[in-house]
Amino acid sequence: MNAHETRILAQSTRRTGGRFTHAPRQWLAAVVLALCGVAAFALAPGTTLPTPPTSTVVRALPLPMLAPLDTGAAPRFRHEGRILRGDTVGNVLARLGVDDPAALAFLRTDPAARPLYQLRPGRSLRVETDGDGLLHELRFLTGAGEMLTIARSSERLSASSAPAPVELHWSFAAGEIRSSLFAAADAAGLPDAVTLQLADVFAADIDFFKDLQRGDRFSVVYEMRYIDGEAAGAGRIVAAEFDNRGKTHRAFLFRDADGSENYYTADGSAMRRAFLRSPMEFSRVTSGFSNARFHPILQTWRAHRGVDYAAPTGTPVRATGNGKVVFAGRQDGYGNVVILEHQGVYSTVYAHLSRIGGGVRSGARVTQGEVVGYVGQTGWATGPHLHYEFRVAGVQRDPLTLAALPGGDPLPASRRSAFAARIEPAIERLALAHRFAGASFATLD
């Protein structure tokens, strides 16, 4: 800032009683400093602003399909608007330029048009009119995922509904753990549904309550569903990377021709192990595996051959592996308990349940991640929690430290080349997300 500029600022005028007078210089200087803060010092003579780091990313984007202009037809106008609280069909259409009493009468009387009257604030409505406001087309996405279309043909209106076409685009984001996974995911703009998937994808390798620490980082590429250009919710994680305690874990989704889908590492090893590390997505260990623990009810020292997870009553408890139910009912100190038998010599126990999951009974088959019951306080329990046991050949083992767990089936060799080709774009997006951690992106892939 040169002397001339400083003098102009100091002699700025203000209007008082219909005429302009000079503002006090001290008052004006204080205002300038208050508004500009440290920026005033950054402009001192002889100083330069630091150049922010820049990075150029070049991506090829598909061009839209162009249709020839029909110069012989009367001009049409397309309008789109959001439904506001308290709106009626009439005032929404009026706001969008529709001036067509016959169309309003049709919308009130035709049964097929009734979903239009479920006006939820925030939903989008699209119309096409001519220059006089005559309605030619109306499109509205209903709450059931149907696209309601009102169309004019030969001066007559008709209503039809069909499943709305869904487009899948890739979005990606990255974040760093400061306090919790959900807080970091929120800061990165990651939908909650994707955050839960992230915890599930790495559940065999990371205990998301016990293992997380400040500085852990994640990058995620995931699908976003779009209907008629409107975001309609998140889909599946396509690829994910999680740096936990100095170790990097990576997972990639592979959809086979038969419709099956699983997550694998870059070399084709299965991400989903035969057993999950924890029977609940997010919980807190209150009592670990021990040879001597003071029992709060029996008031004696005895071995605690399992792990207790504190959680509110009703929290879902999931099977940590595929298996068969060998017991589902009540057992003395266990209270309501489910016991599963897995491949070979393995079995798991889920005790103190408030209730047992629907369809979980002796002889039934359950799959990994299926809900077998809900946290409770039945049996010998002083508060709501899950008592979980992992047994090998009938002997309880500590599931938090047991390393030699069986792995899942790797990707067949015949599918490795197809897998490598499909994950290549996802690897590129992961690298980009990691590079620009803290920002969120969307692509048209």
Image (tube, rainbow, N blue to C red):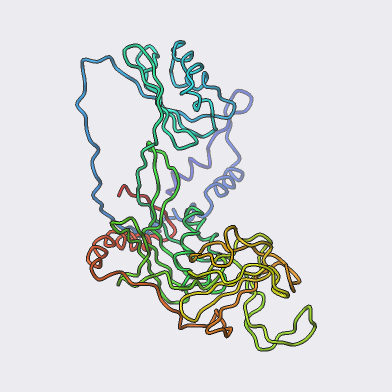
Q: Nearer the viewer, residue 13 or 293?
A: 293
Q: Nearer the viewer, residue 394 or 420?
A: 394
**Position in image of residue 398 (x %, y %):** 57, 82
Q: Nearer the viewer, residue 381 or 81?
A: 381
- Quadrant for residue 54, please give it: bottom left
354 relative to 381, above or below: above
60 relative to 138, above or below: below
Q: Residue furthest left?
A: 68
219 relative to 2, above or below: below
Q: Residue furthest front?
A: 363
Q: Residue at x 43, y 34 (%)?
A: 146
Report the side of 64 relative to 274 (left or right).
left
Q: Nearer the viewer, residue 30 or 144?
A: 144
Specify whether residue 388 is in view: yes
**Position in image of residue 180 (x %, y %):** 56, 64
Report the side of 273 relative to 58 (left or right).
right
Specify whether residue 46 is in view: no
Report the side of 396 relative to 162 (left or right).
right
**Position in image of residue 240 (x %, y %):** 39, 63
**Position in image of residue 101 (x %, y %):** 46, 10
Q: How many marks?
A: 0
- Quadrant for residue 13, please give it: top right
